[in-house]
Amino acid sequence: MLDRLRTGTLTALLAAALLTLSTAVAGAAPAAPQYASTHAAHPSADAAARAGVRAPAASLTQVANFGSNPGNLRMYEYVPDTVRSNPAVLVAVHFCTGSAQAFFSGTEFANLANQYGFIVVYPDANVSGQCFDVSSPQALRHDGGSDPTSIASMVRYAIQQHRADAGRVFVTGASSGAMMTDVLLGDYPDLFKAGAAFMGVPFGCFATTDGSGWNTACANGQITRTAQQWGDLVRGAYPGYSGARPRVQLWHGTADTTLRYPNFGEEIKQWTNVLGVSQTPVSTDQPQSGWTRTRYGGNTNQAPVEGISLAGVGHSLPTSGMAARALAFFGITT
């Protein structure tokens, strides 16, 4: 079942010096995805001293009593030493077998928060297997009473506590966290301005009604619907909502055998429909070797929908530099 999201090895994680993660999952199923060695949240105090620079004093901090928490999640946040006035908020959601600490240490979002002065919220699944609920009927509706509701509470807490800009709230995640990204964008279009999903599936694709958290047909890329049908699943999550919908950036490797590549095309169908733009790309280019980027509804860094297909890449995103591209899509770096 959920072990299918835990495939891979710990080799790349060890190479990346993610010792906290390897300790946390010792004796458990291997974690996925595997991160590149270029990922480091920020230099250690010793390394900073050797380099003659001041180490950041900010650290990942757990927050208690952040509001309604039906999913029994843990909330962590990273508030950099220098925060911009009315900062943006980024929710960064970890993968199965991961943790808030692992996603903090193993991705570049904290480093970028230091540079651009925004706040990062790291939800922690706090269950065996460390996967988020993206499958239950409760998870797939606005204020339904599961993990997405807990994460929405974290967002509202961060906005109030840090006087953040409620109009600049974003979400990103990998694998289970990417699926949660799609779910949050569907459940809470009133909270999120945009999202970036690394190796996800369409909203509602992973749905189950038997209490399990795994949908084999979806994981294998065997669920195909029309754009209208996919879009209706999103619109049905928040009946009566008529406001703006969040923009979406999608990343997927063609060699992904955990959440297979056909899901990428189904996500594009879904979100172009939700955002009311054509499934025909406005532009197609290759920003790097092996990458194919398509933009829908506009040809700017903040297009309504953007897809990045990665030739020959497996279940191993994000890699170095991708976080910065997600922030450019959000508009945080401008």
Image (spheres, helix red, strand yellow):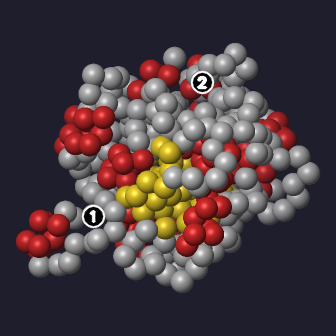
Residue at the image point whose x is 74% and y is 56% from the top: 189
Give SS at disc 1: loop
* Rendered location of residue 263, percent (x, y): 60, 35
Residue at the image point whose x is 63% and y is 34% from the top: 134
- In this rendering, the count of numbered labels is 2
**If you read the primary sequence from the N terminus, does the residue marked by circle 2 or circle 1 appear first?**
1
Q: Residue furthest bottom?
A: 85
Residue at the image point whose x is 53% and y is 62% from the top: 90
Question: Which numbered marker is on residue 27?
Answer: none
Question: Where is residue 288, by image quadrant?
Answer: bottom left
Give the residue pinned by disc 1.
42
Kind of residue sitting beneath label 1:
His
Up-down: is 129 above or below 194?
A: above
Is residue 314 visible to the viewer in this orientation of the structure?
no
Neighbourhood count class around disc 2 (C-alpha, 10 Å): few under 14, some 14–19, many 20 upward: some
* Rendered location of residue 321, percent (x, y): 37, 60
Up-down: is 271 above or below 46?
A: above
In the rendered view, does 251 fall on the left or right side of 30?
right
Give the residue pinned by disc 2.
213
Kind of residue sitting beneath label 2:
Gly
Please name whichever residue, 260 or 7, is drawn nearer the observer in this view of the structure: 7
Please name whichever residue, 211 or 189, is drawn nearer the observer in this view of the structure: 211
Please name whichever residue, 301 or 318, is drawn nearer the observer in this view of the structure: 318
Give SS at disc 2: loop
In the rendered view, does 117 fall on the left or right side of 58?
right
Is residue 47 visible to the viewer in this orientation of the structure?
yes
Neighbourhood count class around disc 1 (C-alpha, 10 Å): few under 14, some 14–19, many 20 upward: many
Q: CA distance from mark 2 to mark 1?
A: 34 Å
Please name whichever residue, 279 or 73, is drawn nearer the observer in this view of the structure: 73
Q: Residue furthest front?
A: 65
Residue at the image point whose x is 60% and y is 76% from the top: 163
* Rendered location of residue 88, percent (x, y): 56, 71
